[in-house]
Image (cartoon, rainbow, N blue to C red):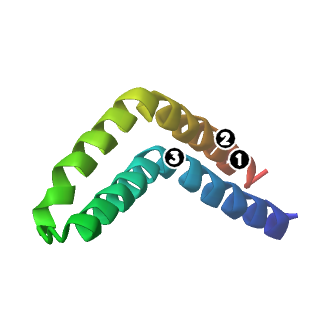
Amino acid sequence: MGEDLVADSLARAFRVLMLASLPALLPALLIGLVVGLVQAATSIQEATLSFIPKLVGVFLALLFFGGLAGGILMDFTRDMLQAASLVGR
């Protein structure tokens, strides 16, 4: 019983980690890809050129989806604390 609970908790933790980080990582990935393609097409090799668009994109994504990610993390934390209180019984 205890091993199953730990395995399920770990699997859920990885799922929650993926869902909570996706709103920040996906825009950075897409913006980096687009800026990289533009840099390759125009032969502009400025390293700082992709930094500002990525920063703005991640900020806007977190502004729009940060509440969703926070809610997912809060639900997970609440469930884990409730499960931890039942372990000793």
Number of the front mark, 1 or 3: 3
Residue type, numbered disc 1: Ala
Residue type, numbered disc 2: Asp
**Where does label 3 land, which residue?**
20
**Mark 1 or 3, nearer chain start:** 3
Secondary structure state at the residue bearing disc 3? helix
Side (left or right) of 48 relative to 73:
left
Residue found at x 18% / y 56%: 51
In front here: 12 or 29? 29
Number of the front mark, 2 or 3: 3
Crowd band around label 1 with a 10 angstrom C-alpha radius: few (<14), some (14–19), many (20+)? few
Q: Position of residue 83 (x, y in %)?
A: 71, 47
Residue found at x 84% / y 65%: 4
**Mark 2 or 3, nearer chain start:** 3
Q: Position of residue 27 (x, y in %)?
A: 41, 48
Crowd band around label 2 with a 10 angstrom C-alpha radius: few (<14), some (14–19), many (20+)? few
Q: Is residue 6 above or below residue 71?
A: below
**Where does label 1 land, which residue?**
83
Label drawn at residue 79 = 2
Side (left or right) of 79 relative to 47:
right
Secondary structure state at the residue bearing disc 1? helix
Q: Quadrant of the N terminus?
A: bottom right
In front here: 1 or 33? 33
